[in-house]
Every structure is written in C-alpha cells, then in structure tokens.
Image (cartoon, rainbow, N blue to C red):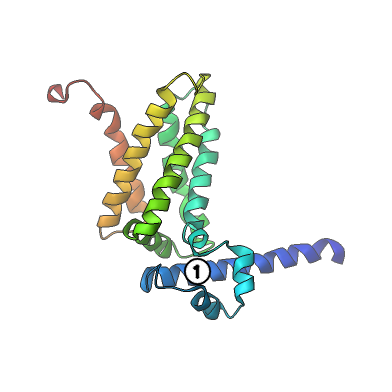
Amino acid sequence: MQGVTGPGLRERKKQRTRDALLRAALELFTTKGYEETTVDEIVEAVDVSQRTFFRHFAGKQEAAFAMQEMVEERFVRALRERPAHEGPFAALRGAVLGSWDAVGESIEAVVPVELHMRTYQMIESTPSLLAVHLRRSIEREEQVAGIIAEREGVDLATDPRPRVAVAAFGGVMRVTGRQWGAGKDISVDSIRAITESYLDHLGPTLADDWRER
C-alpha cells in the first residue's frame, strides 16, 4: 500500500510547491513589476532554492503565463466537447462562456482570482510580455481554427473560413480583454459579462448595412 500512496504524496507536495512559487511570482510581478522582479526574490518568498524554481518553470515568462495557459487549455477542451450540430460561432461562444462559468473555481485552487486578473492586466501593460502574448494568441488561433475545420469537415489548407471565423472571434476576445482591463471591476463575472455582450454584437456587426439596424 505504501508503494502506491507514496508517489501520490510526493506529487501533491510538488504541486503545492509549484503553486506557492506561482503565487509568489505573480504577486511580485503585479506589485513590483515583471522586469524588476528576480528569480531570487521569488524563491526567497517561498524559502526554496533556484533549482527548485527551475524544476517547475523554465523561467519568469513561463510563470507569468501559467494561469493564462490553464484558462486557454480549458477553453480548447470545452470547444472540442461542444455539440456537433453547433455552427462555428455558436460553438466558440458556448465554449468561452462555459469556460468562464467554471474557470473561477479552477483558478482559485491555485491563486486568488483577483491575482489572476491583475496578472492579465500586468501582461497587457508590459511590452515584453505583450509581444509574447500576441505571439501566443496567433498560435492558439491556429490551433482553434484547426478544431473548427475538423468540426465542419473542411480542409484548413484550402478553405479560409475557419481562420476567418477564428480571427473575428479572437478580435472580439482581445477587445473584451482591453475593455475589462481598463475598468474597475476585475472579477470573473465582469469579464464574462463583457465577453457575452461583445459576442452578442458580432453577428450584427458583420451585417452588410449597419444603418438598417
């Protein structure tokens, strides 16, 4: 029995250490500044060695995007699980709103939701991280376009519609992120409400003549 439970205990200890490092890193990034924070300061806050930090993260950048990566992976899983009869925009909308419904609990298991939201704002306001954020967004959009193409039974190499649909959706998501980041309410409920509102405007906005509406 001990041989079965031992690894589980070790893994839980590793996870607790990783979570503590992540909380310390994000708190320092959002209060002191990403560029100004050193790995030495992060490990000192948790009372572990640099070697321990680098066992969990390749560097500060990976720590900065760790929670965002988790949220995006949840969205991708949700998209893959959407009903097959849904069209592209319905599936994308359902996946992102469904993700926000559950994401608060998942975030809270690692860091306070408020800290995650402050981290998003920090990324948006840090030039070096914003450049990485944009590159990651392009890569993620390509992955999502592939999922949409697979769902619709079209060839991504020859049919531009999946990429066009995801580009429009991704543009809306970037706008909602900026609007949310500029506001005073940085709760999950707030960004979900803004996201839902802006996605509701996507169809009418793409209509041929706005003056008729």
Quarter occupied by the N terminus: bottom right
Describe the element under mark 1 as helix, strand or loop.
Answer: helix
Quarter occupied by the C terminus: top left
Percent x, y of residue 51: 64, 72
Q: Which residue lies at the image location 83% right of the left edge and 61% below the top edge?
A: 4
Q: Amino acid at mark 1?
A: Arg
Residue that mark 1 sits on: 23
Q: Which residue lies at the image location 45% right of the left edge and 19% below the top edge?
A: 159
Percent x, y of residue 182: 25, 56
Residue 161 versus residue 193 in the image, above or below? above
Residue 75 versus residue 187 in the image, above or below? above
Disc 1 crowd, CA 10 A, few/some/many (<14, 14-19, 20+): many
Q: Nearer the viewer, residue 43 or 152?
A: 43
Q: Which residue lies at the image location 42% right of the left edge and 52% below the top edge?
A: 132
- Position of 213 with respect to 188 (left or right) is left
- Give the residue at the far left of this rendering: 211
Percent x, y of residue 8: 75, 62
Q: Quadrant of residue 196?
A: top left
Q: Nearer the viewer, residue 2 or 205?
A: 205
Q: Nearer the viewer, residue 29 or 205?
A: 29
Q: Quadrant of residue 52?
A: bottom right
Numbered marks: total:
1
Q: Nearer the viewer, residue 119 or 156?
A: 156
Residue 68 at least partly seen:
yes
Residue 1 at least partly seen:
no
Q: Which residue lies at the image location 52% right of the left edge and 79% below the top edge?
A: 45
Percent x, y of residue 131: 38, 52
